[in-house]
Amino acid sequence: MRNVVLFAAMAALFILTGMTQSWNTSLSILNMAVISAIMAMGVNLQWGYAGLFNIGVMGFVALGGLGVVLTASAPNAEAWNAGGWRIVGGLAVGIAALALLVQAWRRLTGRVRTLAMLALAVIGFVAFRWVFDAGVTAVEAINPSVAGNIGGLGLPVILAWPVGGLLAAAAAWAIGKTALGLRSDYLAIATLGIAEIVLSVMRNEDWLARGVKNVIGLPRPVPYEVNLQRDPGFVAWAQGYGFDPVTASSIVVKLCYLGLFALVLAAIVLLSELALNSPWGRMMRAIRDNEVAAGAMGKNVTKRHLQIFVIGSAVIGIAGAMMTTLDSQLTPGTYQPLRFTFLVWVMVIVGGSGNNWGAVLGGFLIWWLWVMVEPIGAGVLGAITANLPEGSWLRVHLQDGVAHMRLLTMGVILLMVLRFSPRGLIPERRGR
């Protein structure tokens, strides 16, 4: 009953937003809230199930967005002919060099291994740069004002969502193979550093996704508003119910997005609940609570940590792909730790770590607050300072502080939850 009341209260907030502001605003917040809830689900899988402290969330979100560009955007045939295949060849040379280094490490010993690895590293790096750099230069010279990149495969954008998850999962596997043997604090530092590396690559490698020039006009899985407004049938339908066709088209598009996002969220929640209540889920929680005891019982702790780390990162990548699809653009400069790491962690902590429904509730609540606190704070402070004289230092100080209401509110909520409900609004259900 408590869960029902909490979700009913959350629904009331969105209904109130639609009634007092506009349904367009309410649906916009709701769509991003669903995506945020999926991000929180991914972090909850890692932290709530296995106790893995990942603060590189924004890197996996960005990789999900990159998946949309590489999958759904139109291919740039001219760029491929100019240097695209040379870039592929350069990447193949780099991978081959890494494979040879791994084999040298495994098969050789002593000074011979050291010298062989040094020689392979130098030769491999020179060969990689010689092949790769020429291809990059050729591709980025092709119409750089609107392109300068290789483009994508031109596939339906829905297919980009699992591709975004696969890219994030591949990166998580590479990170996990090297970093999961570290203590939790070192793992956190490693994931943060690698997330910054991922973003640095996306911002600087223009051939991949135009870097900071951004990729705009990405395909959408729903109709365009302007096409609905030009459809006589839709216009007649909207006017028949007393709606403005422009407003109605925007609401219909947002509802279409909401339907798709809700299906993905429902599937992830269902699979997560089934996994949590399975023998696998009980094993993961046993490892989380006592790694030494689980290892003594024959469980491969590192392997299971890698497994859940990859799964959680894939979920985050899917959410990142959905967000890029909603925006119809990839803007690497907007990926910031505050939005895509700190805020997602607040969602998990406030909602209830280890509880899937808690992560969903936290995603909805925190995102609604993140968007609505600033306008609500501006109205409250405006009413408080209405009787103060113009130019008063107190009035100016309070009005200038409106921009910081978001951060203040997040901090207060986090402290209140940790003080009065340290296990979150919907605590984890512990079995006997």
Image (cartoon, rainbow, N blue to C red):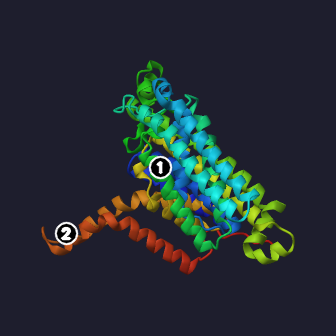
Earlier residue among tags 2 and 1: 1
Please report the residue visible at 38 percent of the width from the left and 45 percent of the height from the top.
Answer: 212
Q: Secondary structure at mark 1?
A: helix
Residue 149 location in percent, x, y?
Answer: 45, 34
Q: Are marks 2 and 1 in contact (CB under 8 Å)?
A: no
- Disc 2 packing (10 Å; few <14; some 14–19; many ≥20): few
Q: For the view shown, which residue lies furthest in the top direction?
A: 232
Residue 390 location in percent, x, y?
Answer: 12, 67
In depth, the one of 382 and 355 nearer the eye is 355
Please report the residue visible at 87 percent of the width from the left and 73 percent of the height from the top.
Answer: 297
In depth, the one of 214 and 133 nearer the eye is 133
Residue 292 location in percent, x, y?
Answer: 78, 77
Q: Is residue 73 visible?
A: no
Q: Which mark is residue 396?
A: 2
Q: For the view shown, which residue lies furthest in the right direction?
A: 297
Q: Which mark is residue 201?
A: 1
- The three-letter amino acid code for the residue at tag 2 is Val
